Amino acid sequence: MFPYKTSLKLSKSLKEPLYLQLANQFILLIREGKLSPGTKLVGSRTLADLLQVHRKTVVACYEELLLQGWVESIPKKGTFVNNSLPLVQKVALADTIKTTKNENSGFNFYQNNHLLEKKAEKREGVLYINDGTSDTRLTPTEEIARIYRKIASKKSIYAFLDYNSTHGNIKLREVLAMYLNSSRGLKITKDNILITRGSQMGMWLSTQLLLKENDVIIVGETNYSSADITFQHQKAQIKRISVDENGIIVEQIERICKQQPIKAVYVTSHHHHPTTVTLSAERRIHLLNLAQKYNFAIIEDDYDYDFNYNHAPILPLASHDTSGNVIYIGSVCKTVAPVFRIGYLVASEDFVNEAAKLRGYIDRQGDALLELTFAEFIKSGDLDRHIRKLMKIYLQRRDLFCRLLKKELGGYFQFEVPKGGMAIWVQLNKQYSWNEVAKDARKHQLEIGEWQRYDLANKKHNAIRIGFASYNDNEIKLLIERLKQTFKGIKKVPIKHF
């Protein structure tokens, strides 16, 4: 006889009704072949006695199984596992039903070696070096929540809960157009804006429309690794050019253009990622002229425009674009908090419309309530006030971090104090390797991260990007102290060799 008593377990503490708990366990037993087609189930009274439940619970369970087609009822004979069910491979009968973890699929699928796993799990007490992220503890959650509640309580809000435009909420697009025109010197309307879930979506959509296999895109020798991976996923041909203290060397782009057609140039003009250098005015104009002459697109990723400490922000390439060659990508994710997935793609109207069509098949639309909230957040001046507050704090943190890094670890690192942004480009003394530093740092509860992504061209420059904005003063001091302990553990006397 089948061991019903040990195989079926019910719990009154669960929200799921007992009869459904019982039915689902029967289904699992049938699917696993432990109750094969044609097997007669024990009578409702008997099973109720065995499980110490009311008979109506068992009757309801059997009725549910009957409705779903797992069993059949034969008058005057009883309830049987449906004979028409396909035979399944039997598994060993366990004393209790256990959930199983499927680690490997039962089918073949395509894997992409370019894509990297995004790991977010963090251990308590460990300091994680990042490449320049905002401090989420400074997020104006009260202001955002207040606006959200106000919008959600309006009677007219129901119109925004249905399917709407794949371009994004029209009010946010209108507000953004005015904001970007006044703060970044753009000359656009709402029709030039597509709302995205962060800058990465804008980059992906642009890549899908611009690049096919073997199309050429130009990037810096040092470059944002996620951009590289996005282009590689599209099977584009990536050509790398040098980067110096004035940004990417545009003369090298011109030489390539004379030799072969190119489809796009990817640039982080304001603060080059990862080195933080700014593209000079002369090179900006040169690049725009080349784009117009050779008909290629410029993907301008302006990921941290808002943070400048030594001077006013330099206007983006998009502000000087008169021929529709620039695709301008940005977001509020880094400025406010990564959890608020509000980004934008700014381009010619025909390109925006095509990107919106494509976006509709991977993400039908954004979060209309959140988009309305940020429209009001920007329009009311709350965003600008938040930026001004962050500027003071991040400037102080930059100065403290650079001062301590130079004072305590000057023999190990060489760097320039960045003029803006949220990170420092740090070159390690070539007597050391980031591999050994990262390994020893873990002993001191410090995680360096994926340092390899900063040398995509394999130039062995021995430099990485270290963020400072997300740490308060005590955390900065602790990070520097743990770095000191790390180098003491390596036990080498540093010599001046960078």
Image (cartoon, rainbow, N blue to C red):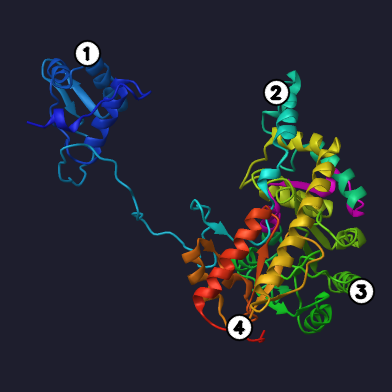
Are circles 1 and 3 on residues that touch, CB within 8 Å?
A: no
Residue 415 falls in image quadrant:
bottom right
State which quadrant residue 287 falls in.
bottom right
Quadrant where the C terminus is found in the figure: bottom right
Farthest-out residue, left: 1
Spatial distance from mark 4 to mark 1, Cα to Cα?
78 Å
Q: Is residue 326 magenta?
A: no
**Element at badge 1?**
loop
Labels 4, 1: front one: 4
Instruction: Check if mark 4's residue and mark 3's residue have beta carbons within 8 Å.
Output: no
Image coords of residue 211 (percent x, y): 68, 66
Which callout, 4 or 3, points at the residue further toward the start of the chain? 3
Total marks in image: 4
Q: Position of residue 383 (x, y in %)?
A: 81, 42
Q: Amino acid at mark 1?
A: His
Q: Label 3: how many residues lie within 10 Å, few (<14), some (14-19) or many (20+)?
A: few
Between marks 2 and 3 in the image, the one whose residue lies nearer the viewer: 3
The magenta stretch spans which residues?
A: 184-205
